Image (cartoon, helix red, strand yellow):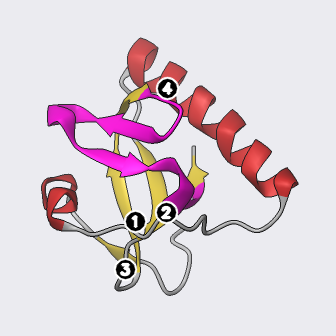
Amino acid sequence: MVASGFEKIEKENIEGLKFPVQDVLNSQAEIQKRQRDLERALSLGNMEQIKIKIFFEDTISPKYVETTVWGVTDERVILKQGVVIPINRIHFLEL
């Protein structure tokens, strides 16, 4: 299921996007859930190469990508080929 209002983007096109510094989430509970989901996505990506959907927002519009998570830092999610998405721009993940 795809959340309405989110446009699919290919991983290779993420590098050209611009991301504001504000977090897209408002509540601490949502931010904590996002962090737990990112840790689970990292495990699924590294152990089983399972693709997930990441729903995020750049300066223009909400988007989603179907990909494998290769790494998670304090500020970024790392995808294959060094593509990154700032964590604070991620709405949610579909695992």
Q: Which three-letter amino acid code belongs to the residue tagged 2?
A: Phe
Mark 4 or 2, nearer chain start: 4
Do residues under tags 1 and 2 come within 8 Å of each other at their CB atoms? yes
The residue singled out by tag 2 in the image is 55
Distance from Cα at disc 4 to Cα at disc 1: 17 Å
Magenta residue span: 72-92
Q: Position of residue 15 (x, y in %)?
A: 17, 56
The residue singled out by tag 4 in the image is 42
The residue singled out by tag 3 in the image is 59
* Residue 79 within the magenta-colored segment of the rendering: yes
Callout in the foreground (1, 3): 3
User: Left of 64 or right of it: where is 39?
Assistant: right
- Among the 4 quarters of the image, the one containing residue 67: top left
Q: Position of residue 80 (x, y in %)?
A: 22, 33
The answer to whether residue 76 is above or below residue 41 is: below
User: Left of 2 or right of it: where is 7?
Assistant: left
Q: Quadrant of the C terminus?
A: top right
**Secondary structure category for the residue under label 2:** strand
